[in-house]
Amino acid sequence: MGRLRGLHLRVVLPNSTAIVGQSMFIVLLFTSSLLLGQNIGNSSDPVSAASGSPEDSQHKARPTVFEEITVTATRIPEEIRNAPQAVTLITEETLDRNHSTAPNQMVREAPGMYSILAAAQGSPIIRGQIGNRVLYLWDDLPLNNGALFSGPNGYFNQIPLVAVERMDILRGPGAVQFGSGAVGGVINIITPQAPFKSSWSAGGETQGIYGSVNGERTNNVKTWLASKHFSFSGGFTSQDIGNYTTPVGTESNTGFNANGGYVALGFVLAPNQLLRVTWVQDRRGDVQYFSSSMLNANGAPRNFNSYELRGIAKVDYAIAKFLHHTNGLRLYFYNQYYDQARDTINVSPNTSAWTSQSTVIATSPQEVYGGGAQDTIRLGLLQIVFGADRRSESLSSNKTLFTLNRATDVTVQSTPLGNVPPGTYQVTDTYGVANIKTSSRLNISLGTRFESSHIHSSPRTQDILTPYFTAEDLSLMKTWNTATWSVGAVYNVRGNWSLTGTIATAFRAPTFSDALNTGTPVYSSNTISVPNKSVGPERSIAYELGSRYSGRGLQFALTAYTTQLSNAVVTRNAPYQVCINNNTLCYQATYSSNSDSGYVRGIEAFFSKRFFSVWSLAGNLTYSHGLDTTQNTPFRFIPPTNATLSLQYTAPKGRWWTASSLILTDRLRNPAIKLGDQNDVGFSVNPAFGSPNTKYIAPVTGATLTNLPLRPNYQLPGYMVTNLRGGFRMWKTEKSSLELTADMQNLFNVRYREPYAQQEWFAPGLGASLGGKVTF
């Protein structure tokens, strides 16, 4: 379904008096209208559909949070309450009402998640892990590849909104189920599939959204056609997102535009055979970056992506009862393609009297081909899913330098030295997961995976940055073999109350960005990467205990976990500087190293309560603590303690609803100063001028100033955010409807910054958005 963009309210916790005043206002606000919490709508079971059942599903009562079906947890379809690990489903209804500009905003209020508003930086944090330590999936296929780097990145946001029907979030290791990278968790984006109908039927929907905070204009169109043996679903999203406003003015270089869509076809080949063909593509253009955008004395932004293009095509064949005891053989093949163009601009000398401007345009074409097979066996109380996958990635990176002479207005094109070499990255794996219902009370899950990752680079002349390293330093042909395992259990203590426990290992195999990242400056921190071929896999083992209550009116979950990390890849300073662009720009050399160990521990709590059939109250709390025990310093990207409280009223006949939510985030108390926070632009007074303690040229006076840390101890203030939402159904017939929605953000117009938001000076201020959806 397309999504309506909404408003989200954020309020900082400036002092105790303001907190009391705002809290009293919020209490009154909650008594009159409230937020959409964890409301769960009906969702289709993708595995049931893949089993070849073409008939329409029968109407049933709305499931509770823990009655929803998930496949992501164990690769076996089951209710969440029977999954040993912590799982959250963000359903179609929640996505519709929590109007989001990008996928990372869709998970902001989910339990155990920390995700900022910046759409260019789409990296949610799960259990203290970010970037390539969280595995992103599209319909069970990995978006992560051998080029994905650590830290914030935009991979997760490169899916069009209309192609997101729901999300499955697995918190904790998912390496047994899905492989390398699933250290902190897994986010699986599920694409809409039209259900088969007993006779020919057609329909669709169109949405339009306008947002005042950033001048947003989003349009979503979706249509479907289905019969007993054929189904079609397709949609298109177009977005034009401008610079957003804050309590102190407009924040420049924060917009983008996007166009994308999907097509999903289904064919019933026989009563027990189903063929699905699915394709999705998204193209984002003029993706702007506020970080370091004012470092150039002539006002040119330091970085922006002129385009980002991602597409995936998948063919999935399923046959039920292929052999005796089997219950669903699946064969699938896919192709994934990606490219982007990033412009990086520098002026020299960096004063108002600059004489030359260099622009490096870096493109990153990638092509992935893969496939696999999976089958399920049922033997009494034992159910086993097993399979194998293989994918081959062709990865490349190219740079072109354009040097403008200001005096002559002549531009010279050249190829700069220092680049990540092209090459291939191949992954082969086999896995098995077993569910055993030993009794009516106890459900045990066991799993194992063996995965082999092979990297092969082919350096070119332009990749070598002399005299710092040679072709030999960039030549790598290596294989890493890793085995992982997991064991989990759900024990029904009594009635609706259960206890859960899991022990699971995970790993992340090295990629090109770990071993061969070469000559790519991080301008905000004045550092540049150099290769290190000796880097190896990161490993972890996680222990998780939980308690759940799943009643019709009340759902509750409490989870405690600890993740032990070993051979963790961290960034080290090399004992030299690297100069590029004809020695005009020099940076501190850094490299990746498996030198540290440590742990991340935390508690996650969630509840949802329904009152009088029309009121629902929901909330969640997340606490995390991480320590690099090798250096006795906090790990990076450990979010501060945060919580969400929401209340919603839905009219008895469902014609209108009103909702309010409160998001509270404690101050960032333990910055990882030794591991890189001291160079993170998000900790400086103004990220547009680079990292803390960076020298910059004042735009008006031309004076050389220092961009100090926002706080001397690198801590960041906490904040409190309030959202108001509502919807009204103008009409509804058997085949059509019109619903209007409204959303407000930052009701108190409070000035605040989200921790680890490198693209924010301040978060968006007070704004409103209006949307309308017509279903036909």
Image (spheres, grey):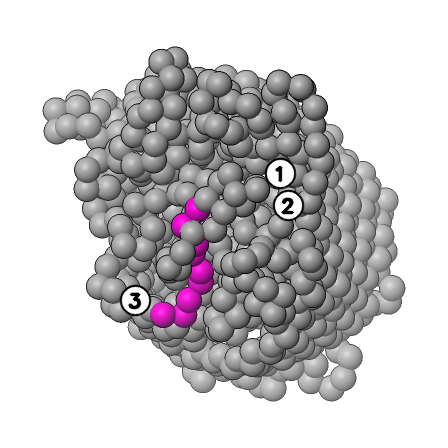
- The kind of residue on which mark 1 rests is Val
Residue 205 is at least partly visible in this image: no
- Whether 454 is drawn above or below 665: the answer is below
Label 3 to label 1, Cα distance in Å? Answer: 39 Å
Q: Within 10 angstroms of label 3, few (less than 14), some, or many (20 or more) residues?
A: many
Residue that label 3 marks = 599
Residue that label 1 marks = 360
- At a point 33% along the width and 19% down the height, the residue shown is 703
Q: Which residues are magenta?
A: 587-595
Q: Is 593 colored magenta in this rendering?
A: yes
Q: Is 476 colored magenta in this rendering?
A: no
N-terminal of the pair, mark 3 or mark 1, is 1
- The kind of residue on which mark 2 rests is Pro
Q: Within 10 angstroms of label 2, few (less than 14), some, or many (20 or more) residues?
A: many
Taking the view exactly as shown, the residue that stands out farthest to the left is: 17
Helix, strand or loop status at disc 2: loop
Residue 416 is tagged as 2
Where is residue 491 shown, x and y percent of the image? 36, 75
- Whether 409 is drawn above or below 318: the answer is above
Where is residue 554 shown, x and y percent of the image? 34, 51
